[in-house]
Amino acid sequence: MTSQIRTRFAPSPTGLIHLGNIRSALYPWAFARHKGGAFILRIEDTDTERSTDAAVQTILDSMAWLSLDFDEGPFFQSQRLSRYAQVIADLLDAGLAYRCYMRADELDELRAHQRAQGLTPRYDGRWRPEPGKKLPAPPVGVEPVIRFRNPQEGHVRWQDAVKGPIEFSNRMLDDLVIARPDGTPTYNFCAVVDDMDMRITHVIRGDDHINNTPRQIHILRALGQTPPVYAHLPTVLDASGAKMSKRAGAMSLLQYRDEGYLPEAVLNYLARLGWSHGDAEIFSREQFVAWFDLEHLGQSPAQYDPDKLKWLNHHYIQSADDTRLAEWVQPFLRALGIAPSDLTQGPPLTRVVALLKERAYTLKDLAAEAALFYRTPHLDHAEYARSLTPEVSAALTGLAAALQDIEWTRSAIHRAFTATLERYPLKMPQLAMPVRLLTTGTTRTPSIDAVLELFGRETVLARIRALEPRT
Ligand code: GLU
């Protein structure tokens, strides 16, 4: 019987989720989906001072935005405390963990002494039971911590799916505190019990956890488990080359949503931020899942490149279906003050986005340009007056007349322009610019004939004529 692949995302709900964080969800998700396995969400919220409900919600919203669906969970460590207490009791009974009555000040003193001798500070095992060793009587009034009895000799090794073989000497590892004096379990211990209970087969996480892994392996073995496969992902660096972090001002994933990035673009971008499939740069979620493997995870830190993300976003906007694009852009239009009722006053939004999407890098950009079709232009009269020579003015009147009776198509509008230019000594931009200003309030628009076609004859003529010099 082949056992099911089971992966997890185990965030701590202590703030925003940035691109680097969510990548630690994306890869285990993709691996589980690729293998037909299960993906589990576990919220590591035992740090009650730093964990917040808002941060939990941010995790759920971030995953939902990228459609990273989970099969089990969310499990909350804060709701599993009795389970951890039970496992600690079992380890104590089996002699695999012990009570240590060393006070914090004694530990500080020991560490200071070790540092002064140039040694790495480590617990000296004074309360560790050994055959023939006589332990002092527990001091009165000191609540003990529980320490895990780590092997003292030999090595711990694992074949990391990303980094290759990794080995730690057990001499480097002291006896880890697994429960504090108030009985609350510590991070490494909870993670191990959860990985065991949730039958995790592949732990795919950031390489900042590499130093925890030897400790976790020992605890798992003490609990009679075979350790899972570990895949430690190299750090994500921000655009300046520093480790991406909340503190260094990393943007939250949901800000990308709010800035008008498409989830498929962000997913595609993140997929490539530390993993590759030949030289494929643009691929769908389905392709990603079909191709994803641990063998092609990158070994060196991946650097965030905002221009590449924009380029991908542009690609996905450009290739999106116009009806969907029109839906996606509406919240951004609303943010610009364009209400759904305003949309009925202008050209169909699907046609507007179809015209503009080639130029847009984000939905926000797209909305800013689309808005021009649904509001009365704010004409900069001074700018307009500067372009308004007597020839231009006459040509505008001529253009309006030419537009009056033509069939209202882009090519006919174009012909009306060229015919007008034959009659007046002007170049195309000299005529197109004031027309752009009059109809949209800006000089930066796509091809003027396409813009005018969308506005419709009535609006175009009204706007051109509204400012005809009165004689
Ligand atoms: N809670 C840990 C973190 O947010 C993740 C631990 C793990 O993946 O094992 O960094």
Image (spheres, rainbow, N blue to C red):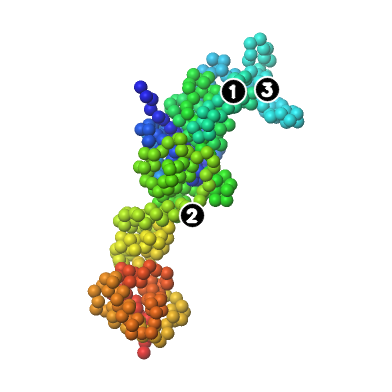
Q: Residue at x 50, y 43 (%)?
A: 20
Give the numbered dot on residue 328. none
Do the residues bearing badges 1 and 2 touch, measured as CB atoms within 8 Å?
Answer: no
Q: Position of residue 365 (x, y in %)?
A: 42, 60
What residue is disc 2 on? 307
Work out which quarter of the rendered image holds the N terminus and state it. Answer: top left
Q: CA distance from mark 3 to mark 1?
A: 19 Å
Dot 1: element: strand
What residue is disc 1 on? 155
What residue is disc 3 on? 124
Q: Position of residue 333 (x, y in %)?
A: 38, 60
**Amino acid at dot 1:** His
Identify the mark nearer the N-term, 3 or 1. Answer: 3
**Amino acid at dot 2:** Asp
Q: CA distance from mark 2 to mark 3?
A: 52 Å
In the rendered image, is residue 361 in sight? Answer: yes
Dot 2: element: helix
Q: Residue at x 61, y 23 (%)?
A: 170
